[in-house]
Amino acid sequence: MRTDIINYLEKEIYKRANEPSNKFGIGCYYHIEAVVKNAQILAQKFGADEEIVIISAWLHDIASITDYSLYEMHHIHGANIAENILKQFNYEEEKINKVKECILNHRGSVNNTKLTIEEKCVADADAISHFDSIPSLLYLAYVNKHMNIEEGRNFVVEKLKRSYNKLSDASKEFYKDKYDNVMSLL
Ligand SMILES: [Fe+2]
Ligand SMILES: [Fe+2]
């Protein structure tokens, strides 16, 4: 396991998330951290290459937090930024290409059965990560969007349903209890 790269990425992502140029705020860091955690769990569960999955998870939204103008195409820009960083660590080209694919395909292409198991782990971890940040979603609804109690509840429920429905079938099964628990609270 390339812990040198992983430790660097953890610090670098935290640093970039804290910069004033990151329009999404520090909440991004906690999102990315949750994606890494879930991606690692899924990699172990489904027998994916853990190193590829963890590195990809740290890097999957790096373009968005680095420069807001890259947000719309952040999967493409992110793959390029990742390549530059990983080359500096002399990471093997074949592995760099796998990481780039995970970043390129992390957005809602989960139902594409052509995805590799590593790509599925990162995409599914991205979708399920919302279930680890319910307070942030409530804050978004009630504070940022000034919703009333019922509107806020519906906003969060619908967002979570969409995220859950993006999961691959295997991950839906794996996270079913988490889904049911969160929904019963809301
Ligand atoms: Fe993303
Ligand atoms: Fe993400």
Image (cartoon, rainbow, N blue to C red):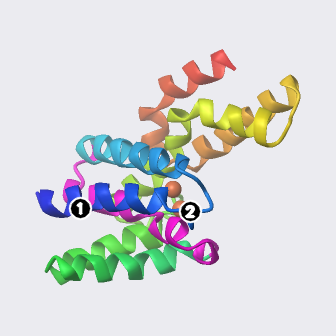
Disc 2, disc 1: CB below 8 Å? no
Near-viewer residue (117 or 31) = 31
Of badges 2 and 1, nearer the viewer stands 2
Q: Secondary structure at mark 1?
A: helix
Find out whether residue 73 is within the magenta segment: no
Magenta stretch, main secondary structure class: helix
* Above-or-below relation of 170 to 51: above
Check disc 1 and give the amino acid type: Tyr
Q: Amino acid at mark 2?
A: Pro
Q: Is residue 53 visible?
A: no
The earlier-in-sequence mark between 2 and 1 is 1
Q: CA distance from mark 2 to mark 1?
A: 21 Å
Residue 20, label in figure: 2
Quarter in which the C terminus is drawn: top right
- How many residues crowd around disc 1 within 10 Å: few (fewer than 14), some, or many (20 or more)? few
Q: Which mark is residue 8?
A: 1
Q: Which one is nearer the viewer's eye here, 9 or 48?
A: 9
Q: Residue furthest left?
A: 1
Q: Is residue 177 left or right of residue 159?
A: left
Residue 159 picture quarter: top right
Is 34 on the left-hand or right-hand side of 8? right
Q: Is residue 111 above or below residue 125?
A: below
- Frontmost residue, 174 versus 33: 33
Residue sitting at x 34%, y 42%: 37
Instruction: Return the residue found at the far front.
Output: 20
Query: Residue 44 location in percent, x, y?
Result: 23, 43
Residue 64: give x, y in percent of width and height.
Answer: 54, 67
Label disc, if present, on residue 39 of the rendered structure: none
Q: Which residues are magenta?
A: 46-72
Q: Residues within 10 Å of mark 2 (few under 14, many from 20)?
A: few
